[in-house]
Image (cartoon, helix red, strand yellow):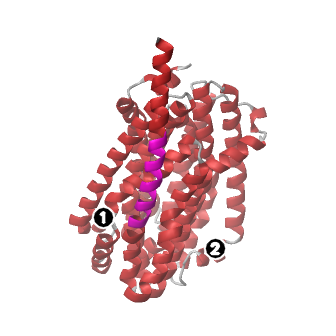
Amino acid sequence: MNEHSQILAKEKIGKLLYRLSAPAMVGMLVQAMYNIVDTIFVGRAVGFMGIAGLTIVFPIQILVMAFAQTVGIGGASIISRSLGSGDLERAHKTFGNIISLVILISASVMLIGGLYLEPVLRLFGATESILPYSAEYLGIILFGTFFFVLAVSCNNAARAEGNAKVAMNTMLISAGLNIVLDPIFIFGFNMGIRGAALATVLAQASMSIYLIYYFLSGRSTLVFKVQYLKIIPNILKETMAIGASSFTRQASASIMVVIINNSLAFYGGDLSIAVFGVVNRLLMFAFMPMFGIVQGLQPIVGFNYGAGKLHRVRRAIQLSVLVTTGMSVLAFLCFMFFPEFFIRLFSSEQELIESGVEAIRIITLALPLVGFQIIGASIYQALGKPLPALVLSISRQVLFFIPMVILLPLYFRLQGIWMAFPAADILAFIVTYFLVRGEMRLLQQDTDAEAIWERTENV
């Protein structure tokens, strides 16, 4: 058992969760700066129409993220459990299969996006006036697809072996470079929205180069060999089954944004699309620390579940729920009491600021419940239980939000779109609570049995 595995097996849960989550949280926050920095600079250089253009492209980026997370989280779950049970060969083969899937996915996205750029943007809600801005941005972003998918997938592999620091470093390097390059390309070279896209692609390339160096340097537990690139059906099936919940959550989020964009174009117009773009990026920034906790939690749960240390699994889940709930409450208070401050970061246009303040206060009404929801689906992914993970992933966006965002505007017009967010959060929280409560009871029973067995062995 190497150093990273010993840490996962023996270190105190509180310290271990902090060790793995803190770098992930920093990395995720920095990663969220990609879209936030792009939006701030574009908003200042181009105006709210530029923000609206980025808002149309955003669900496409979410969809690409969905494919990357499917491969990365699904493969990481197998890697964690394989390392926990001592099956190093299976861990290495899984890593090789992740690389193969990255190549296939990125090539497919670039081909389809390049051939059908304008029809795709119209499908995702672009109006005639917004379309030129969206096309300029997406046309360049597509060239960075391989780097983006590779980085997301391999970051999960690094976390699966307990090395969260590498994942954090990749995001710090890329986001830092993006922040430096944005003003240079947007203002210095007068490239506008195209400059924001080019800065993002170059930053993503730097992230991939760092990860390639790490995995080939011999510092990783995982070994890359060309023969491991051959797709193994049972690994592929398990990867996709476990990652399906992540894909469903991200893909349904993309569909959700498409429906919102089209509804906003009908009920509110271009300004409302820009408002949603700003609010959505602020929410992403609030959620990223919670996703950092998830990324620290999953290798702990996966490894210790595979090693039969169920008391550590239960303790890690309890602590994670407590921390993410505190984070969601803090974000709720910030958005409720200081909304204008956050909206003004993106624009000085008074019409956008006034509409944004009203929207964010309605959208975040049930935000304190979100932390628990985020942990709920991740528990089942780490345990290798795809069905309940899938149910929890689709509950908010598919089962609750999409019907709400279609029905409520019929009665409340534009405000009905904003009201759909807290309504869906409340209903999803209820479903998550009952499923997770049942799983925790099962873990408690198994933990009690584990303790009895250990006492018997020591007699």
Mark 2 secondary-structure assignment: helix
Decide which of 238, 67 is in the foreground and name it. Answer: 238
Mark 1 secondary-structure assignment: loop
Tell whether position 2 is magenta: no
Specify the amino acid type for callout 1.
Leu
Compared with residue 258, is residue 321 higher up or lower down, i.e. above or below?
above
Compared with residue 59, is residue 450 higher up or lower down, i.e. above or below?
above
For the residue carrying disc 1, how many other residues have a C-alpha within 10 Å: few (<14), some (14-19), or many (20+)?
A: some
Residue 82 lies in what quarter of the image? top right
Magenta segment, which residues? 426-442
Query: Residue lying furthest left in this view?
Result: 337
Q: Mark 1 or 2 closer to N-term?
A: 2
Specify the amino acid type for callout 2.
Val
* Horizontal arrangement in the rendering, residue 435 relative to residue 239 (left or right): left
Nearer to us: label 1 or label 2: 2
At 60% from the left edge and 78% from the top edge, which residue is drawn? 122
At 72% from the left edge and 62% from the top edge, which residue is drawn? 111
* Horizontal arrangement in the rendering, residue 146 relative to residue 129 (left or right): right
Decide which of 76, 351 is in the foreground and name it. Answer: 76
Q: Which residue in the structure is indicated by mark 2?
A: 120
At 39% from the left edge and 32% from the top edge, which residue is drawn? 19
Residue 293 lies in what quarter of the image? top left
